[in-house]
Amino acid sequence: MGSHTGGSEPAGPESREALMPQPAPGRKLTHGAQMPSLGLGTSPLRGQACVDQVRSAIEAGYRLIDTAENYGNEDAVGQAIRESGVDRSEIFLTTKLNRQWHSVSGVRAAYEASLERLGLDSIDLLLIHWPNPDQGRYVEAVQGLEELRQEGLLRAIGTSNFTPAHLRRVYEETGLSPDVNQIQLSPYATRDQSRAYHDEYGIATESWSPLGASGTELRNDPVVLTLAERYDMTPAQVVLRWHYQLGLVAIPRSSHPGRIRENLSIFSFELSADDVAQLSALDRGEAEVVDSDTFGH
Ligand SMILES: NC(=O)c1ccc[n+]([C@@H]2O[C@H](COP(=O)([O-])OP(=O)(O)OC[C@H]3O[C@@H](n4cnc5c(N)ncnc54)[C@H](OP(=O)(O)O)[C@@H]3O)[C@@H](O)[C@H]2O)c1
């Protein structure tokens, strides 16, 4: 997938309009679905707080919402979507299934259970949340997703926390590659090998913890702070723009409506190629990310 590379000069917002949220541009996935380039993460929100945050994000213009069976908030996310007044077809909804569903029939059962909790009649993208290689059944789970997609029940199929080795095994045994692989990715963990594999196989890379999660180190990194000042944007906006210019789909989460709007307001400025490279140079390698060969649920 193409990246959105900046020119050489810094270009800050030209007017206050630039600070207003705008719809995220879409990107086309392998199986034809159009997915927004930026969405809302919902973990660990639950209950009414989750309904309120998701509704305020949809009002602000978010059209990609990320939930999971494991977050225990599909009911709240579904309620927010139903109450938003925005047509269901305009929202790209992702959910994820847990390890006990790693079989062809299990994936179908997980899909049906998610729909029930969501109170909606469709899911756009279903992800295998973790590969759980100790069970050795993620290939079957991908086959289960593909069966649902072929029946028209999913617009796209996906994995999460799969390494190139996991994806290669799926490809070698089935000839399938997911539309999306959602992985932990930020300027501190740029995941170069994963991104190269994804690019080769036409897999969209989705970044979880795109802002470095609840720790504030990345958002206070001197490089990030310098660029925020230079572009007259916030540290979070600089980091999210970096994801966008690398062609990644980021799903930041915030409990504050103002920040939810701020995080979508990144489409009116452009980082220079040098500044993108400076952020990428903050990479600390794979030691920075959760090891999906040993962790999963
Ligand atoms: N597939 C997986 O295995 C997996 C794993 C983890 C997460 N995820 C998904 O990825 C989503 C995002 O990841 P995440 O929640 O871990 O981390 P994140 O989005 O990188 O960071 C969230 C943190 O950043 C703060 N924040 C957000 N916007 C900000 C802004 N504009 N200025 C300053 N601070 C800001 C939030 O604080 P406030 O709330 O106080 O604003 C929160 O503490 C999750 O919600 C979930 O949907 C997926």
Image: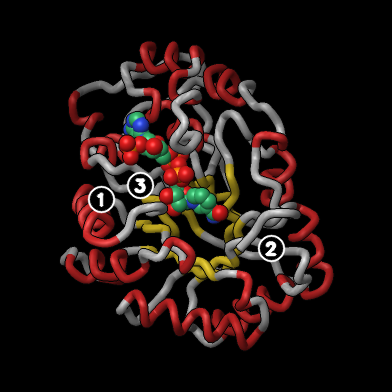
* Dot 2 and dot 1 residues touching (CB under 8 Å): no
Q: Is residue 37 visible?
A: no
Residue 182: x and y in percent read 57, 53
Which residue is more in the foreground, 56 or 194? 56
Residue at left 58%, top 63%? Answer: 129
Q: Amino acid at mark 3?
A: Ala
Q: Quadrant of ligand 1?
A: top left
* Dot 3 and dot 1 residues touching (CB under 8 Å): no
Q: Which of labels 2 and 1 is toward the front? A: 2
| Residue neighbourhood size for the residue with mark 1, other residues' Cα within 10 Å, grouped as few (<14), some (14–19), many (≥20) | many
Q: Which residue is denoted by mark 3 in the rendering? A: 24
Q: What is the quadrant of residue 294 in the picture?
A: bottom right
- 258 left or right of 101 in image: left
Q: What is the quadrant of residue 237 in the picture?
A: top left
* Dot 2 and dot 3 residues touching (CB under 8 Å): no
Rendered image: mark on residue 131: 2
Q: Which of labels 3 and 1 is toward the front? A: 1
Residue at left 76%, top 60%? Answer: 166
Q: Amino acid at mark 1?
A: Ala
Residue at left 46%, top 23%? Answer: 271
Q: Which residue is denoted by mark 1 in the rendering? A: 57
Disc 2 from disc 3: Cα separation: 29 Å
Residue at left 63%, top 34%? Answer: 189
Q: Which of labels 2 and 3 is toward the front? A: 2
